[in-house]
Image (cartoon, rainbow, N blue to C red):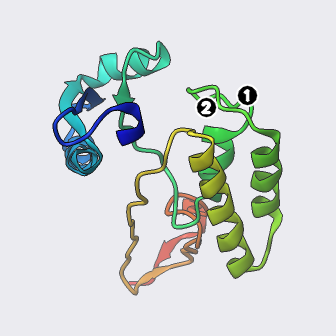
């Protein structure tokens, strides 16, 4: 920022656009606070949900904070949000090298190698100034011991939830 003429006495003003829901606003407020460290003065712009996605699709924002679905393994979001031509790749980011890495992480069975590949992808996305991942939230699923037949997946709280296989032993 300093190379571009910004600093403690000259700050860049930006609007941070997000949906007007608490679980969107809270991370946006945290982002605005963090941006202060690098000479940005952020203003929170909350948008009603019905207008938010059309606004994002029109690219009618300067900084937009959106939540993406994922599990503890980011594999499921890489292709859909960063793959060339993907329907939710709103920025139009496209890098064939990243596409190759996304395919690699999807087929890699070794958990540690998958983690290394994921960090490589994130580092490349940062270097390319692609839409940054600010943080991964934690999600959990719990159930009572009398719920039988439920298989929880390691990469998503949504995958593998086949209710026809679940029964109550009570």
For the point 50% across and 73% down, the residue is 167
Residue 30 placement (x, y as % from top left):
22, 51
> For residue 14, which quarter of the picture?
top left
Residue position for label 2? 89
Q: Pick the quarter of the image with the N terminus.
A: top left
Estimate how packed mark 2 is, as few (under 14), some (14 to 19) or many (20 or more) residues with alpha carbons within 10 Å. Answer: some
For the point 52% across and 55% down, the residue is 70
Residue position for label 1? 85
> For residue 92, which quarter of the picture?
top right
Q: Are marks 2 and 1 in contact (CB under 8 Å)?
A: yes
Q: Is residue 1 visible?
A: no
Q: Is residue 78 visible?
A: yes
Estimate how packed mark 1 is, as few (under 14), some (14 to 19) or many (20 or more) residues with alpha carbons within 10 Å. Answer: some
For the point 36% across and 37% down, the residue is 65
Q: Pick the quarter of the image with the C terminus.
A: bottom left
Disc 1 is placed on an element classified as: loop
Disc 2 is placed on an element classified as: loop
Measured along the vertical axis of the image, is residue 106 above or below residue 3?
A: below
Residue with the most extreme bottom position: 145
Residue 49 placement (x, y as % from top left):
29, 25
Residue 12 placement (x, y as % from top left):
26, 30
Viewed as shown, does residue 47 lie left or right of 103?
left
Measured along the vertical axis of the image, is residue 141 above or below residue 78?
A: below
Query: Which of the labelled discs sits on residue 25, or is there none?
Result: none
């Amino acid at each position: 920022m300093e190379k571009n003429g910004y600093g403690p006495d000259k700050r860049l003003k930006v609007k941070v656009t997000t949906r007007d829901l608490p679980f969107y606003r809270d991370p946006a407020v945290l982002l605005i606070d963090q941006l202060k460290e690098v000479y940005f003065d952020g203003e929170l712009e909350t948008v009603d949900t019905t207008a938010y996605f059309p606004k994002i699709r029109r690219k009618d924002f300067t900084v937009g904070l959106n939540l993406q679905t994922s599990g503890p393994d980011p594999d499921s979001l890489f292709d859909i949000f960063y793959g060339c031509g993907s329907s939710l790749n709103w920025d139009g980011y496209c890098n064939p090298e990243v596409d190759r890495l996304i395919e690699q992480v999807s087929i890699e069975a070794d958990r540690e190698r998958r983690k290394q590949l994921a960090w490589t992808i994130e580092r490349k996305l940062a270097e390319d100034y692609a839409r940054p991942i600010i943080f991964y939230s934690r999600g959990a699923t719990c159930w009572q011991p009398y719920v039988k037949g439920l298989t929880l997946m390691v990469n998503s709280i949504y995958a593998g939830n086949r209710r026809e296989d679940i029964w109550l032993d009570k």
